[in-house]
Amino acid sequence: MLKTTITSGHEAHAPLLQSQSAATESLTVVFEMLGAPMFFQPNSEIYGEEEPAEYFYQVFEGAVRTYKVLEDGRRQIGAFHRAGDVFGLEAGDKHAFSAEAIGKCTVRLAKRSGLLSFAERDSKVAAALWAATAKSLRGAHEHMLLLGRKTAEERVVSFILAMANSPASDQIIELPMSRQDIADYLGLTIETVSRTFSHLESTAAIELHSSRRIRVPSRRDLQRLDA
Amino acid sequence: MLKTTITSGHEAHAPLLQSQSAATESLTVVFEMLGAPMFFQPNSEIYGEEEPAEYFYQVFEGAVRTYKVLEDGRRQIGAFHRAGDVFGLEAGDKHAFSAEAIGKCTVRLAKRSGLLSFAERDSKVAAALWAATAKSLRGAHEHMLLLGRKTAEERVVSFILAMANSPASDQIIELPMSRQDIADYLGLTIETVSRTFSHLESTAAIELHSSRRIRVPSRRDLQRLDA
DNA sequence: CGGGATATTGATTGATTTCAATGTGAGTGG
DNA sequence: CCACTCACATTGAAATCAATCAATATCCCG
């Protein structure tokens, strides 16, 4: 199984694939068959908004951001994708978002036409495609709640909790993305994100070992700060 | 076709079904076969968050809001659904959102099990289900950009433009929802929404015939105020 | 050991929220 | 038919949270 392949060599980390649903697994099998692995350098474009959507994508290793920009440059990151996540699922022949590698990363590309004709013949694959799309939708809904109704501190806390994907306490979390990425994901400025991290540290809710390496001594305590 | 059925008797209004995609149409056919129409009173619950998701839903007449609330009562409306729109598509056995009728409305309910087993046998139906889910995802992404990066005025303008679903200028728009609903959709307070409507009126970007009936003299002019 | 990007911290401003009245309109009953 | 009422909407003044403007500080990377 690819699951094994993906996690091999990462045993020291928290599991990269959280609650791997049966549906995602089944899409993973399809990506193994149809997907061509492709390597991307940090900050390189995987696809651009408005480009014809020719492929579906699955992160194999590393992390990816998908985003939209307004004419004047304001950027909203829609989601961060990590190993095992499928992205680029929007229907229609054009991408609604752009996608970039955050650090070095490997992504599997599966031709839409191939995967869709596969889905036509195998209803399990069609169901997996639907489930993966619905999973993205669920994530977008959660993100919407955060952007629309939460305070800066609640946003940062929600983000940290989402990045700490195991329910265990006392986790060390490695953030692959910059403060600017976090700010553009949370709908805040980089200064507000930085200040909020500092403030959380000052109240012992988190420890900042370095700017991209944080420790959550008690997940419960942190959760109490989320709405 | 149901399209005819839905719009019959509404010829005086702007078309209720904007760009009805082939995919939605094909789901509409399924709803005609499997769906039981159900009538809802204003503000009545269609389903609640965390309830087992037993059905898929299509608005037949009227308007529906889907939303999430935080423990302390802050509410985020995820989307407004109008005639022809399919909602409740989230995968998983529980609803992620709640859904309520805004005014009096009729909704068709199709059992998930039935529609899914139909999709298993007919790949066209499976594709339509996927496309409808992806359409929700696209809407959520657009909404995210609005919540994360737009100013109050831009949000209200985006909202008005979305409610004016024909590209024509000089439209009169009937808003089915209250200012509170709009506020909770845009991530603003009711006062800010009200002030922004007033300000748009003072600059002649819109006319307020009554609080729920507005006229857009020039769509182009209004679009210039959107980001 | 630089040097440039990234991050933190401080001071101030400003948009939106909050608090507080006032206005408006649809429905009801006298 | 009018007055009353209640929910909904508008408007105003003050407070607040996050953004902006402005220095440093720190971390990589060569």
Image (spheres, coloured by chain):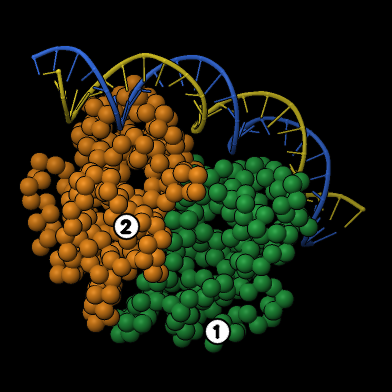
Chain colours: A green, B orange, C yellow, D blue
Q: Quadrant of residue B92?
A: bottom left
- Binning the other alpha carbons within 10 Å of mark 1 as few (below 14), some (14 to 19) or many (20 upward) gives some
Residue under the image location 20 percent in, 34 percent down: B172
- What mark, if any, has residue B47 been given in the picture? 2
Q: What kind of residue is marked 1?
A: Leu
Residue under the image location 44 percent in, 81 percent down: A26
Instruction: Give coordinates of residue B76: x percent, y percent.
Output: 42, 46
Instruction: Give coordinates of residue B224: x percent, y percent.
Output: 37, 35
* Quarter of the image where the C terminus of chain B is located: top left
Please, is residue B88 above or below residue B184 in the view? Answer: below
Q: Nearer the viewer, mark 2 or mark 1?
A: 2
Instruction: Give coordinates of residue C26: x percent, y percent.
Output: 18, 29
Task: Tell me the subunit letter for badge 2.
Answer: B
Please, is residue A102 above or below residue A33 in the view? Answer: above
Q: Which residue position holds label 1? A: A2
Please, is residue A32 above or below residue B102 in the view? Answer: below
CA distance separating discs 2 and 1: 38 Å
Q: Quadrant of residue A140?
A: bottom left
